[in-house]
Structure formats: C-alpha cells, structure tokens
Amino acid sequence: MAKKHTCLIIIICSLFVIPFSLYSLTLDETLNTLSGVSKDESVQFRWDPLLQNGVFNIGDHFGVFSTAPVKGETGFLVFNNRELFDVPLPYNENGKLEFPENFVITLKDAFTKSFENDAGRFRITTIIIDPGHGGKDPGAISKQNLNGKTVQVSEKDIVLKSGQLLRDMLNQTYPDKKVLMTRDTDIYLTLDQRAEIANAVSVKDNEAVIFISIHANWSANANARGYEVWHITSNYRRSLLDTSKHNYSPDISVILNAMMEEEFTTESIILANSILSGLGKELGGSVPSRGRKANDWFVVRNSRMPAVLVELGFVSNKNDALLMTDDEGLQKLTGALYNGIKNFIGIFEH
C-alpha cells in the first residue's frame, strides 16, 4: 500500500510543478515549427492589432487566439471552430509577439491530427464545370424582345458566363480544391473531349471528382419555362473500374464495377437534389422547378464520377431569357447552383 501511495503522490506533484514551459518562440520560429505539418500547404498568419486577435491556418484548418496582456496568462485556442484548448496565450513583448512553447506544441499537434484525419476521410478534390456547346455550336437560340430591343439569346453565351461565375464562387470558398472548366472561352469541344477532360483527373482512393454540365433549354412552346436537373438512369451500365490499377478476377471485377455504378448513380441523384434545393430556395416561386429527371446524356454517362446536367431555363421563354441574359439574374441563378454544390460537398465530406 505504501508504494501505491508514493506513486500517486509523485504523479500529482508532477502535474503541478510547472504548468507550462516558460520558453517562448518568436513569430518566425513559430511559423518554422508549423511548416513541417503539411508538405502541400504553407502556413499563413493573420494578425488584427486592433482586436489583438490572430489566426494561423494551414490549408482549410485554422487556429484562432487572443493575446494576453502579460506573459504567463492562459486562455483558449479555438481550433477549426470545433475544439477548445486551454493554453498559455501569446503575448506582446517590446512590440513583438511571443508564443509560449506549449501554445505552439498544442497548435502543431492539432494541425497534425487534422491532416491525419484528412488523409483517411473522403474528400471532393476536383469540381469539373462543363459549359455546354461553344464555338461553331451555339446550342439553343431564340430571338426575344427584351427591354425594348430584339436580342438573339444564345445558350453557349449564357452557360459560359454562368460557368465562369460558378468557378469564381467555388475558388473563393474552396482554395484547396481544383475547379476546372472544360472550356472557359468561346471554343468548340466535342462531347468526347468533354468527357476525356473529366476522366483525365487523377484521384487517390479517398478522393472524388464531381461533374456539372450547364445548359439552357428550348421549346416550340414559348410558355415552357423553368429549371431542371438531369442525372444518369439507374439501369444504365458502364465500365467504371480501372483495370490497369487492379488485378482482380473477372467475377470480382464485375461485382466491384456494379458497386461503383450504384455509388455514382446514388451520389448523382443526391447532387441533383441538392442543386434543385439550392435553386428552389434562391428563386422561390418566381421560376418554376421542372424537377429531377433521368436520361443517359452523353457527357453524364461517359463521365466516370457523380455527374449532373443542369438546364438553367428556356431561351425560348421571354421571362427565362430575360433572367439569364441579365447580369443580376444570371448571378442569382448561378449563386443558387453554387449553393446546391456547396451543400452536396458538405454532405459528401462530413
């Protein structure tokens, strides 16, 4: 019994002898210490001298802190808006920030664990935006009297502008993801070329790509209007398994290919529903929803990933054409499309 009590006393004493290291690091030393966390992402530091708040971020992970008025005070380090660490706070000494060693160690451990978790979780690393038609192929066209002028409304122009807006929105929100466009100018691409661009993206086992093809509709009925989202039919079968990377038996390959087909189809449906929801919330009843539909469109069936085709509206309808050719209107449509994609990414990754 005596030995047990002795050990307990030693442990308790060790906890309270020195609560934290008295050693501090400069900002440059702290940045250098954190720089080894990720080989792909650099360390960024932002400082607000008015609020005396700072942020370290690496990739999409970040730690937020406030400074202490004097050396030795403790407070909270907020990491990724989800975790709180009670640490000795950075402080200002002779006009320069000093970072207690335990603060730096805690922050580095939090970053390291987050990147280790990233390596094991599924992530969407690339978003392919495919503005339909282009160049010699104008897509759907019509002449409309808009704001007192007769205007030729061309699908290829509308979807290119929408695609560029969408790209900029996604780049702003997801600097860690690749946002690629099959075309970002008025050029002609074959359907095969569009699918090849998407399928050429290389991903790891825990990474994914999504494909969004943007179009505008046309109908002989000038009253037809509204947006709709298409995905592949559930009974369509493709060869999705990359046999060059695996040496499975034919029987196993068939099973794995069927599982991938089911997975991509399901995710395409979820992506379509998410985009429809984003459009519905943004546009309300001002533009009718034509719902989610299934068809084996070429670019959808030949893209080996979750893929959808979005029809923003009808160039043959005056109200839709006015919305799609107006800068503010197209911004609103594209923002709704962006919200749907963002929501899907949240579902997929978390």
Image (cartoon, helix red, strand yellow):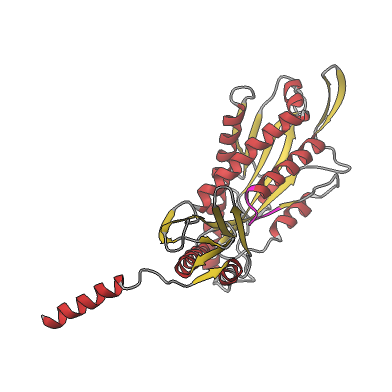
Q: Is residue 187 above or below residue 315?
A: below
191 or 92, nearer to the observer: 92
The residue sitting at the top extreme is 148
Seen in the image, is 215 located left or right of residue 46? right
Q: Is residue 238 visible?
A: yes
Residue 134 found in image quarter = top right
Q: Is residue 198 above or below residue 8?
A: above
Q: Position of residue 297 (x, y in %)?
A: 69, 44
28 or 288, nearer to the observer: 28
Residue 329 found in image quarter = top right
175 or 340, nearer to the observer: 175
Residue at the image position 30 percent from the left and 70 percent from the top:
16
Residue 198 lies in the magenta-colored region: no
Q: Position of residue 158 (x, y in %)?
A: 78, 35
Residue 178 lies in the magenta-colored region: yes
Q: Which residues are magenta?
A: 173-179
Seen in the image, is 275 located left or right of residue 164? left
Quadrant of the snapshot with the N terminus: bottom left
Residue at the image position 65 percent from the left and 54 percent from the top:
175
Q: Position of residue 170 (x, y in %)?
A: 66, 47
The residue sitting at the bottom extreme is 3
Residue at the image position 63 percent from the left and 57 percent from the top:
176
Seen in the image, is 337 located left or right of residue 67? right
Q: Position of residue 34 (x, y in %)?
A: 56, 68
